[in-house]
């Protein structure tokens, strides 16, 4: 796998990364989203420093990931129930 050296900007800092070339676009997009979230938190809340904005971003992104995971599990359960129901119909 070919790796690329890139720099992403988050919260006014540059972070050098070595990433697989097929992940570069995704990482750049996520870094931009995080940077926008930081700006949004700073504009809408009285935060003491950048660390507070980063903590809020981490919390929001973690919550989003957990909701996505739970939604995926629920979808799998629904699909399994539908397959079971269809199998029962075919057996009748």
Image (tube, rainbow, N blue to C red):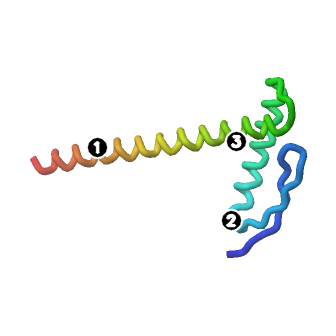
**Residue nearest the observer in this picture, 33 or 38:** 38
Look at discs 2 and 3 and give the one toward the viewer: 3
Q: Are the residues flagged by discs 1 and 2 in contact, CB closer than 8 Å? A: no
Counting from the top left corner in percent of width and height, residue 67 is at 53, 38
Numbered tag placed on residue 22 in the rendering:
2
Earlier-in-chain disc, 3 versus 1: 3
Residue that label 1 marks = 82
Q: Is residue 14 left or right of residue 57?
A: right
Residue that label 3 marks = 58
- Measure the alpha-carbon separation of dots 2 and 3: 24 Å
Q: Quadrant of residue 63?
A: top right
- Measure the alpha-carbon separation of dots 3 and 1: 36 Å
- Identified at 70% across, 55% down, the residue is 26
Counting from the top left corner in percent of width and height, residue 48 is at 86, 30
Above or below for 28 versus 46: below
From this viewpoint, which residue is outermost toward the left? 92
- Identified at 28% across, 43% down, the residue is 81
**Residue nearest the observer in this picture, 13 or 84:** 13
Above or below for 58 versus 43: below
Tell me the quadrant of the picture where the N terminus can be found.
bottom right
**Residue nearest the observer in this picture, 92 or 31:** 31
């Amino acid at each position: 796998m070919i790796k690329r050296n890139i720099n992403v900007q988050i919260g006014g800092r540059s972070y050098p990364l070595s990433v697989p070339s097929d992940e570069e676009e995704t990482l750049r997009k996520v870094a931009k989203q995080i940077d926008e979230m930081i700006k949004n938190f700073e504009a809408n809340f009285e935060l003491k420093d950048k660390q507070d904005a980063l903590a809020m971003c981490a919390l929001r992104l973690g919550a989003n990931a957990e909701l996505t995971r739970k939604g995926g599990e629920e979808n799998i359960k629904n699909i399994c129930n539908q397959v079971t129901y269809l199998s029962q119909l075919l057996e009748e």
